Image (cartoon, grey):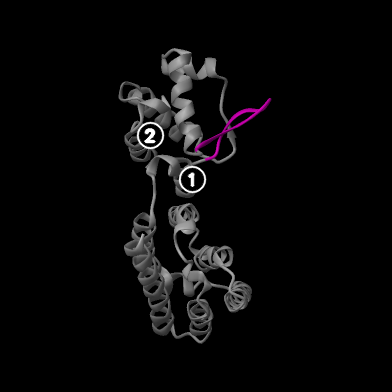
Amino acid sequence: MLRSWAEGVGQVVRVSDNQGVLPREKDAIFLQLAELIEARYKQASSKLPPEGDLATELGVGRQRLREALSALELVGAISVRKGAGRTWEGFNLGRYADGLLPFLMAGTRTARELLEVRHALETALLPKTAARLSETQLDRLRNLAEGMVLEAENGSSFAHLDRQFHRLLFEPLENDTLNGLLDSFWVIYEGVKSKVQPAAEDPSIAAMHGNIVEAISQGDIQRAVYELDAHFYGVEQKLATDEGAS
């Protein structure tokens, strides 16, 4: 997975030579480094060896190595702390989108397309996660749903609660890729929300979250999927309208 991701990063971050991040001729060392990390530093928060050791292992000069490391830092796969060196943070779509947002020049269309992907995935996976949700998790989901309604009725955006709700809803699946995709949507959404009137201020959309939870609690998974589908349809229509108006 990391190699495919690294290749995608290379294609995106080379779009501007002014950035000096990852010109095409440096792809090979970037991919070598990605594969090395995939093989040896799979766990998040793993401390990477000094540059000299990495350069020797890869058989490249330090300057080329630093450029590859900078690309990984750009997309959040590596963190750097003064005095502590570099740490492998792991593959995460949310950090990836956050790091690349300036290059992606994302607009409402990007957010809408990501929302369509979420729509398909979440409705397909809802029956599986619903069967694994504990009573404690359902109570937390109810509290978040109630909080969203209150925020919406006050005319405030409840995007932060919406994000927590969907992450918690699929928490039992322990699917890092899905979690990363959810985070990616919110990163893009945060980048474009100044251009749109947030759908999250609509009380009717807020109330749909409570309907989803109650349907799951009653064991009516078909209705839960219906409520989730209706929720996404409403938000997608809002974003499509905003895109057309922008």
The count of marks equals 2
Q: Position of residue 149 (x, y in %)?
A: 58, 78
Which label is found at residue 13? 2
Identify the residue shown where x is 48% and y is 49%. Answer: 94
Residue span colored magenta:
77-89
In the drawing, does residue 179 fall left or right of residue 237?
Answer: right
**Which disc, if any, is residue 98?**
1
Which quarter shows the C terminus?
Answer: bottom left
In reply to whether residue 164 is colored magenta, the answer given is no
Is residue 116 left or right of 146 when viewed as pictured? left
Where is 218 relative to 195, above or below?
Answer: below
Q: Main secondary structure of the magenta part?
A: strand
As drawn, is 84 to the left or to the right of 193? right
Q: At numbered mark 1, what does the secondary structure look like: helix, strand or loop?
A: helix
Give the x, y percent position of residue 7: 33, 35
Quadrant of residue 236 within the rendered picture:
bottom left
